[in-house]
Image (cartoon, coloured by chain):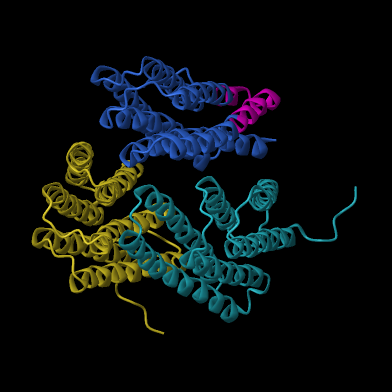
Chain colours: A yellow, B cyan, C blue
């Protein structure tokens, strides 16, 4: 029987990094699709593939958790972090599927802004999660968490102005239904990023 | 003072079976109502009664959990399993109430398919949950979980095609609002079945 | 080094009281705004301020929890209670923001009833939560929990009749979309109150 040279605890950090990187890649591809205004089957399928990769890593984290006795931080936090990171990618995939389903092809200024903020937030989330390896330097990690919280507030205001504009300018109720849902899922994506930041902050407090 | 001949641990399996059987009965009655196209007060009331029975069993599980020291598997898993099983019945009741409220009486092909898949999924859930008594034979339990996951994917695609058809064919926005919500709750019902399957899989992994 | 004269455990009760009082104040202000039919920037800002105060107390509870070894009841219950109490205020703020955003200025009979029930429920929640200090007298606490459950049922029926009336009487689909969402968030507010009552009941059972 051979022993792994990498302590099992380290494996969690690698897997969280994979999840976070996956969320960043999904957010970057989503921004490209929004800019092109073209949610065709090929683009949406690529997002779906990334979402499936995310699922695989999430399952690996939960499996590892169930088989590991000593963990780098609380089991509940590891479980919650894995699920919430996964949710970021899920939400981006949900927006993409709706864009295709609803045949929303015209360029949309508000969604471009959302895509930009989502990508920024995913990058800050990835930095915060990556920082958990060096928990002795919490200052930088906290700065990324604060940035994620700030972006969630920006997203909140963006949703408000987008919905106000929608009801003011669009007269076709079916189009209102479609875009309202897209904006709401976009805002929920930023909520999920904030959930991750809150879990990271909680982990820091406990170790502090 | 008399001692019960049934170990307390066994009681959980009986209660989970009751919950799962209740979900299957609710799903079967729901399918009948969809086929008849008649969500009248009598039918919806029967669904509501089943939902209340489900609530009672859920409370009994949580009470038993709070009074029991040794449990057949992790306390959090027992709690989560009870809540998610309860949610299946809740969701079916939610669809039924909306059908009546929205006066949706014409037969609907997509909802019939959803009702069929929901019943199949509830039956697979019941088999998976029932299998927890004989956790030493995990292979069969896992097969039921995989079936529940497969049906959730089928439901996802059904929702997509149902919503595409809805926006393509129905021009009355109020009718679109109503059916869109019904399809979404139907799909959420299958998500809840999948949540149960995931919890069961997690229990197997820990005992494995 | 000085020791605090108030045991740390007591601090939780003070913080829960603050959260519950905050929810009651938010509900009372919301009722006033509904009665005046005037969700202007000033009124909505006051609600938002109360919501931010609520957030601060919630964070303080979670911080205290993470730094405290001995807690008056289960850590998970303290965490869940803090989050769900916070959600009550969040939901009332969500309705208020939508009222302003959707420019819903005409007086609405159903929303007045919701506001009344929400305030009653928040008051019962505050009594139940306050009762946790004297857990040896569970009878009174349970009565408040039962009252919260009763009000949730009243809210359920109110939502049903409000939605029926909405689809029957309002022909503008955009107006239907707006009011439907407002009624749903109002009903969710009462669900959150019920969640708190259920957590309180769970705490009583465990200590019983």
Drawn side of residue C159 relative to residue A151, left or right: right
Magenta stretch encompasses residue B78: no
Locate the N terminus of chain A and report the quarter of the image it occupies. Answer: bottom left
Q: Position of residue C84 (x, y in %)?
A: 46, 36
Q: Residue at x 43, y 25 (%)?
A: C19
Residue A168 showing in the rendered view: yes
Majority SS type along the magenta span: helix
| Residue C132 among those drawn in magenta | yes
Residue C105 position in % (x across, y down): 32, 23
What is the x, y in percent for residue C207? 66, 36
Q: Residue furthest bottom?
A: A1
Q: Is residue A73 above or below residue C174?
A: below
Relative depth, front residue between A21 and C63: A21
Residue A59 picture quarter: bottom left
**In the drawing, does residue C140 fall left or right of residue C110?**
right
**Front residue of B130 and C1:** B130
The relative height of residue C140 versus residue A196 in the rendered view (above or below) is above
In front of the other: A165 or A129: A165
Quadrant in the picture for residue A194: top left
Q: Which residues are magenta?
A: C129-150
Q: Nearer the viewer, residue C132 or B175?
A: B175
| Residue C68 visible | no
Q: Is residue B156 left or right of residue C164?
A: left
Q: Residue at x 58, y 76 (%)?
A: B141
């Amino acid at each position: 029987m051979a022993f792994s040279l990498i302590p099992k605890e380290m494996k969690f950090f690698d897997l969280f990094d994979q999840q976070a990187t996956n969320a960043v890649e999904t957010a970057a591809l989503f921004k490209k699709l929004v800019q092109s205004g073209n949610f065709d089957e090929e683009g949406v399928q690529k997002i779906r593939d990334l979402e499936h990769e995310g699922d695989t890593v999430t399952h690996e984290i939960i499996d590892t958790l169930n088989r590991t006795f000593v963990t780098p931080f609380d089991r509940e936090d590891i479980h919650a972090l894995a699920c919430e990171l996964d949710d970021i990618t899920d939400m981006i995939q949900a927006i993409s599927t709706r864009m295709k389903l609803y045949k929303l092809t015209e360029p949309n200024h508000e969604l471009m802004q959302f895509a930009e903020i989502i990508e920024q937030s995913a990058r800050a989330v990835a930095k915060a999660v990556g920082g958990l390896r060096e928990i002795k330097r919490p200052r930088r990690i906290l700065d990324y968490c604060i940035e994620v919280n700030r972006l969630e507030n920006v997203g909140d205001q963006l949703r408000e102005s987008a919905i106000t504009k929608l009801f003011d300018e669009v007269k076709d109720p079916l189009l209102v239904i479609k875009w309202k849902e897209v904006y709401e899922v976009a805002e929920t994506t930023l909520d999920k990023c904030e959930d991750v930041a809150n879990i990271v902050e909680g982990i820091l407090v406990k170790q502090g």
